[in-house]
């Protein structure tokens, strides 16, 4: 069975590498072809177009930036749906509003193919280790068809409901994490004047009841950032969090809701991006507020 991966950003590339390492034949495509190079060196076939990718593969996984990118990759004569895709399974893993996935599923089904959405929680490290958390939406039949592959990528994957349910859960799960980076920056600003070593401070916070798992796993990187040091390569940057927050706020509006915490956090991260922090890793964001906006 050949598995295709379209969209080779950080997560797509890590998913492609994981699939190769567990023994799958993998074909990849990315709009910027140079990003396919590392996977080609591992044995992946590089498709010349999304259409070629879909024709070669039985399961096609897409990890794309936003709704606009989904439209570019799926539609048109060179898109994933540009040829005969009857019987193929598309697993769409992008973080977008549920309505985007629902509309896409209809286009896929019209072409007599199967569709499952499955955005995931986690960053590059968990993706490489098969430790992601999967939020699937679709039919039970399509979920079971995709599950052997998803189980190799995820430590846990759950069918949340019909198409759209996976995206709803992914946005919900990402919201507390996005807000945490700002809340920890504010918390550190309150006690920074005590002069305690940042490594000690982060380790101490990780023992408290308000600490999320990410502070325990990424604590050393956070401490390095608070000291003005390089925390390591970016896994989930400020601009990616901004995109997710905008998606959350937009989805809340469709539901007749407001998300005041998400909206205020988005405003702060917009400010951080304007001040040059857009490409910096999430572990650096507490340092933005606590060091740049505290006296």
Image: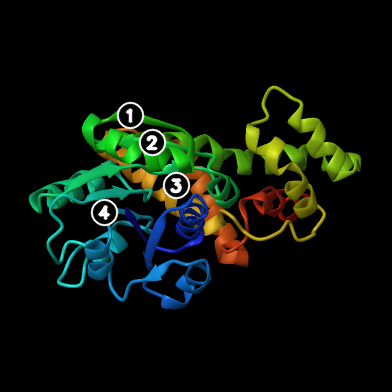
| Separation of marks 3 and 2 at Cα, in angstroms | 18 Å
**Badge 1 element:** strand
Pick the residue in front: 72 or 5.
5
**Badge 2 element:** strand
Pick the residue in front: 111 or 102.
111
**Mark 2: few, some, or many residues within 10 Å (few <14, many ≥20)?**
many
Find out whether the residues at labels 2 and 1 contact each other: C-beta distance under 8 Å. yes
| Separation of marks 3 and 1 at Cα, in angstroms | 21 Å
Q: Which residue is mark 2?
A: 135
Q: Is residue 11 left or right of residue 68?
A: right
Count numbered badges in the picture. 4
Q: Earlier in the sequence, mark 2 or mark 4?
A: 4
Q: Quadrant of residue 258?
A: top left
Which mark is in front, 3 or 2?
Answer: 2
**Badge 3 element:** helix
Q: Which residue is mark 1?
A: 160
């Amino acid at each position: 069975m050949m598995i295709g991966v379209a969209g080779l950003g950080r997560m797509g590339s890590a998913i492609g590498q994981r699939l190769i390492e567990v023994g799958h034949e993998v074909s990849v495509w990315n709009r910027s072809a140079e990003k396919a190079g590392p996977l080609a060196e591992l044995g992946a076939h590089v498709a010349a177009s999304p259409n070629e990718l879909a024709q070669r593969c039985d399961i096609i996984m897409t990890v794309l930036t936003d709704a606009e990118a989904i439209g570019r990759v799926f539609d048109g004569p060179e898109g994933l749906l540009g040829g005969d895709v009857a019987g193929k399974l598309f697993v769409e893993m992008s973080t977008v509003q549920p309505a985007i996935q629902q509309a896409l599923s209809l286009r896929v089904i019209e072409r007599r193919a199967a569709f499952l959405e499955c955005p995931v929680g986690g960053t590059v490290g968990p993706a490489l280790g098969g430790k992601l958390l999967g939020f699937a939406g679709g039919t039970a039949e399509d979920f079971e068809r995709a599950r052997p592959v998803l189980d190799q990528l995820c430590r846990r994957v759950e069918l949340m409901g019909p198409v759209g349910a996976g995206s709803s859960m992914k946005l919900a799960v990402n919201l507390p994490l996005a807000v945490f980076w700002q809340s920890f920056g504010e918390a550190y600003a309150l006690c920074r004047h005590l002069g305690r070593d940042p490594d000690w401070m982060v380790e101490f916070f990780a023992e408290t009841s308000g600490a999320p798992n990410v502070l325990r796993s990424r604590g050393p990187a956070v401490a390095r950032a608070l000291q003005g040091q390089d925390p390591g390569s970016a896994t989930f940057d400020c601009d990616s969090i901004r995109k997710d927050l905008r998606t959350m706020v937009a989805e809340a509006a469709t539901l007749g809701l407001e998300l005041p915490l998400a909206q205020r956090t988005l405003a702060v991260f917009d400010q951080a991006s304007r001040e040059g922090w857009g490409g910096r890793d999430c572990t650096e964001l507490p340092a933005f507020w606590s060091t740049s906006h505290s006296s």
